[in-house]
Amino acid sequence: MIFKAIGTWVVNSEDEMRKLAESFAGFITPGTVIAMIGNLGVGKTFFVKAFCNAVGADTTSSPTFAIVNSYLGSYPIYHFDFYRIKQADELRDVGIEEYLADESAVSFLEWADLFPEVLPKKRLNILFKEIDVSSREVIVEQLG
Ligand SMILES: Nc1ncnc2c1ncn2[C@@H]1O[C@H](COP(=O)(O)OP(=O)(O)O)[C@@H](O)[C@H]1O
Ligand SMILES: [Mg+2]
């Protein structure tokens, strides 16, 4: 993981969010786990899809109800959503530890704050906050 440019951004449109995700994609290297935190509708899935698009991964055929979706672009991307998970064992049963340990892949975890016990110490957090209908604050933190 070489990404150091942690900070805060305010984006005022979907297009700006897409551009932010694309610029992230230029810095993130395989082996990175990205924990995404923020309320429903704030743009977590939007960000993951824009990131995937930027690395040549097609996300269009993925079921929205899955615990984890895998996409293949320049490298594999594992996309978890903890929203409907009731207990951490459901995540362990699908093999989350193996997914997150895959140094050849990038993992995104939506609603990561619901199960902090499964998160690796070394990760990025991306916190999303809604400012208004089209504006978002995006805070990136590097942990571990
Ligand atoms: N600046 C913005 N960035 C991201 N999404 C935005 C923005 N402005 C409006 N939206 C809308 O907000 C919604 C975000 O939905 P989604 O990404 O599914 O949220 P989440 O995964 O956080 O629940 C989408 O309908 C998107 O069109
Ligand atoms: Mg989502």
Image (tube, grey):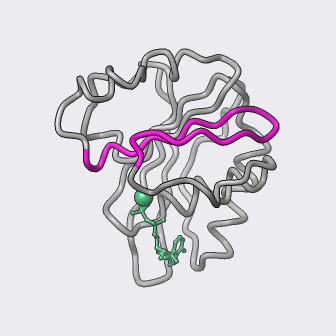
In the image, residue 115 lies at what x, y percent?
Answer: 26, 33
Task: Tell me which residue sits at (79%, 47%) in the image.
Answer: 55
Instruction: Inspect the magenta stretch and tell me whether residue 79 lies in it.
Output: yes
- The residue depicted at 50 percent of the width and 58 percent of the height is 45
Q: Quadrant of the N terminus?
A: top right
Q: Quadrant of residue 97?
A: top left
Question: Looking at the image, is 53 positioned above or below residue 42?
Answer: above
Q: Quadrant of residue 81?
A: top left
Q: Position of residue 110 (x, y in %)?
A: 41, 47
Query: What's the residue at 61%, 57% (across, down)?
Result: 61
Q: Nearer the viewer, residue 104 or 61?
A: 61
In the displayed image of the protein, which residue is found farthest to the left? 86
Above/below status of 12 relative to 43: below
Q: Which stretch is magenta?
A: 66-84
Asked if residue 123 is positioned above or below residue 80 in the image, the reply reads above
- In this rendering, position of residue 117 left or right of residue 26: left
The residue lying toward the viewer, choosing from 142 and 109, is 109
* Camera-side residue of 55 and 123: 55
111 to the left or right of 32: left
Residue 44 % position (x, y) = 47, 57
Q: Is residue 49 above or below residue 118?
A: below
Q: Residue at x 71, y 36 (%)?
A: 28
| Foreground of the two, 41 or 83 | 83
